[in-house]
Amino acid sequence: MSRDLIPEVSTLNPTPNHGRFAFLVRALLTRLRFLILFGLLFGVIGNWDRLQSTWERLTTGTQPDSAISSDTEFFCPMDPGVLSDWPEKCPVCNMTLVKRKKGEMIPLPDGSISRMQYSPNRLWLGGVQTVTATETPLFRTLELTGTLEPTSAHTVTARVFHKDLPWITTASEVQVQASEPTLDQTPTHATILAVEPAPHSSFRTLKLQLDGEWNTPGNTVRVQVKTPAELLEPFRSLPSKPPELVPGEPRVRFECMEHRDVVRLAPGLCPRDQQELMSRPLTDQQRIQWWCPMHPDVVATAPGTNCQACGGMKLVPRVIRYRKPGMVLAIPATSVIFDGKRSVVYVDQGGGQFEGRLVTVGPRCGEMVPVAAGLEPGDKVVAQGAFLLDAETQLNPGLAGTYFGAGSRPESAAATAGSPSKTRSQEATALAGLEPADRALAELQKTCPVTGKPLGSMGMPPRIEVNGRPVFVCCDGCTDRLKAQPEKFLSQLKRPTNSGPNAAAKP
């Protein structure tokens, strides 16, 4: 091939397309330079924490602060929306945050079945309204039909259902009036004389003595029996009229917000979860009483008393609330959700947070319901929209637990009260609240060294250190006896072997 046919490289000229492409790139950079600059600026601002931690790691050679563990977090039981990666105080209530695993459903306090949080918009759409539980006089009213006896203008007989007899007492206020408003008869009061059985009938005969004489024997009258709720059970058995205060009597108690039965008279830690006890003053209707968790009938009004039925167990303090004479704690009837087995109310915890609680209620008194247990005066309960909250809790129970890190205590539907299966379920639930290492030790120990009862039968077992060895007891009342005679009670326990589930744990 001839060299004349091969052009030299230096004589090749660039194609017009190359110049056109470079011109377009320069034009785009000129027009988009401000957008590119703003994008870079926003990228630096959005990733500033990451850039700062990377710079510190490269310049100092140390790892920046991070969470104490990648699978644990800390939350506030009183304000469950407060979360932290480190153990610290709640900025809302100043309570020490509780440790939990992320996504773990921790058992709720006794008496609570669920916790949920709603946005203000959802509460407004659902029409949720709350009222304050207060002590007030309540009366149970029965409307009966009676007849004036033909032979006496002072005696009235009325029929009453057998199921309504518990709501009638000798102290009930009875008023008798004419059956027709057009009759010119002034209403008068009456006194209950007797309740006579009626054979082969679901009714009973109520005999009344009129305070005044009517001139229409044999006529039909209306009888209204009005009974104070404080005279009905279980309110009649509740303590009333608190004793006089004596010098030196404690007026402040320290209690665990997660375990309401843990009450102390001095600052300290909860024996169940090692969280700081919160200080709360006593009201005028509250007193401190000492009792035995194993034998609730054994009580004392002063510290230092021992339970002889337990062989010397020291009584522990608890708070007793006395109701005001003539009054009962009352809430609207619309606040109570009854599912056939239990009564539930939803308490407003603030910030859109609601807690479902089990309550013991009495007979309905008009538009109100008296409450015997489960609430305290001043609690805000949902009076309108409680059914909507309960429906969402039932439809999505996982949300009620995982959002707050708390769930209701599981209970087998087939288990009945007092059955072995239910007892084992309660014990397993109580042990589930312990840390994994402590739960393994408690399951291996099985029984309380002081009373011999299964661990978990009295709730979450407290953990104490005795001679450098972790030991669990059934309740707080066994702590002092175990510390006083450790050799006697520890000899009844078998030391864990290396084949157990806690082989790595040192006994």
Image (tube, grey):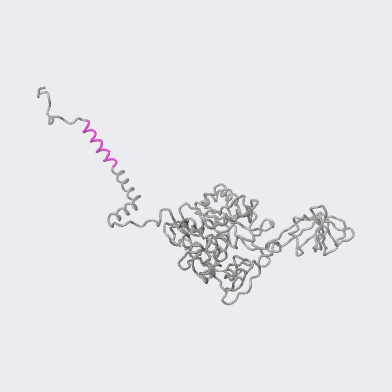
Spot the residue most to the top.
1
In depth, the one of 435 and 188 nearer the eye is: 435
Near-viewer residue (404 or 285): 404
Q: Nearer the viewer, residue 228 or 296?
A: 296
Percent x, y of residue 52: 32, 54
Quadrant for residue 328, please give it.
Answer: bottom right
Rendered location of residue 398, percent (x, y): 52, 49
The number of discs equals: 0
State whether the magenta stretch is mostly helix, strand or loop. helix
Locate residue 76, reporting x and y percent: 48, 59
Check if residue 19 falls in the magenta segment: yes
Q: Residue furthest left?
A: 3
Left or right relative to 339: residue 396: left
Residue at the limit of the structure toward the right, as seen here:
151
Q: Quadrant of residue 19?
A: top left
Residue 191 in the image: x percent, y percent?
80, 64
Between residue 140 and residue 432, name the one nearer to us. 432
| Quarter of the image where the N terminus is located | top left
Q: Residue at x 79, y 58 (%)?
A: 223
Give the magenta part as a residue range: 17-32
Left/right placement of residue 192 relative to residue 88 reads right
Q: Toward which corner of the image does residue 207 lie, by quadrant? A: bottom right
User: Residue 130 magenta-drawn?
Assistant: no
